[in-house]
Amino acid sequence: MKDDFQRRVQRYGWDRAAGDYDSGWQRPLKPAQDELLARAALQPGHNVLDVACGTGLVTFPAADAVAPGGRVVATDLSAGMIGRARTVAQERGPRNVSFARMNAEALDLPDGTFDVALCSLGLMYVPDPERALREMHRVLAPGGRAVAVVWGARTKCGWAEVFPIVDRRVQSDVCPLFFRLGAGGALDAAFRAAGFASPTSDRFRVVLPFDSGADACKAVFEGGPAALAWRTFDDEQREAARAEYLDAIASYRTGRGYAVPGEFVVTRGSKRE
């Protein structure tokens, strides 16, 4: 029952965030997504699964990389995210990509279907990320590979104060174990437990750029995991939360904007032949 509740929180929260996600996070998250795609080493003809695809920020570059002859199936728990991704697909016109609302822990896909499975900054939100990785392993063909990236150590992520700021105002249950997979060798261990052979992990730091305090606040409160809780705040609570968050990131201010530190962990593992 607890996992079901957490899934509902994630589903409805990301439905609320879908409209603001790209404007808030597309530029800050690009280095992590580029690193994920580099590790995936996609080639024309590959069949790719993109788990927790969001609005398609990884999906569409992956679709370009596997054309001609390859395809991308992209899944997400949030109907809002899937709807937004489909709209972008209609505008862009790639014919080798499809989207489906699906639980990462119970993929409605056949065994041994894909050459590569990707998950960009989605495993932190899954109640049982190890189960999600087992599902990714199941749908890969022998010799296929999976690559996932998660946020790293909490102390290295300058925006992390958003969670206690929100929780002091409402019990959000957004991400009770958000930074667990980014600690130590946790993601590598999760890959091994899911059956992946010889997983390799790297940790890297970036700077997340925001052009103004308003942009920084909109990203974390309206376009991120706190979006569902944010909708319950009255005007006074919102103003106080914004002020508290800007105070928390004040040391990262650069003129009008902010350069907020972040850390990621990326792991790649293969399915045995």
Image (cartoon, grey):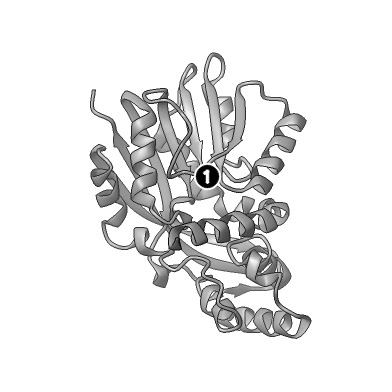
Q: Is residue 31 left or right of residue 265?
A: right
The quarter of the image holding the N terminus is bottom left
> What residue appears at the point 30 percent right and 38 percent down from the top-left corner?
269
Q: Is residue 79 visible?
A: yes
**Residue under pointer 1:** 52
Vertical relation: 211 (above or below) 109: below
Decide if residue 253 is on the left or right side of residue 66.
Answer: right
Residue 61's x, y, as percent? 58, 33
Vertical relation: 91 (above or below) 205: above
Amino acid type at circle 1 is: Ala
Residue sitting farthest toward the top: 69
Of 188 and 232, nearer the camera is 232
Where is residue 129 drawn, in percent x and y?
Answer: 38, 51
Q: In this picture, is 233 found above or below 119?
A: below
Residue 121, percent across and down? 48, 51
Identify the residue at image location x=47%, y=22%: 47
Any part of residue 256 in sight: no
Q: Using residue 209 as the reference point, say whether residue 164 is left or right of it.
A: left
Q: Please, which residue is most extreme toward the front here? A: 1
What's the residue at 55%, 79% (across, down)? 167
Where is residue 261 shown, x and y percent of the image?
49, 66
Quadrant of the rendered image containing residue 53: top right
How crowded pointer 1 is (Cα within 10 Å; few <14, some 14-19, many 20+) is rated as many
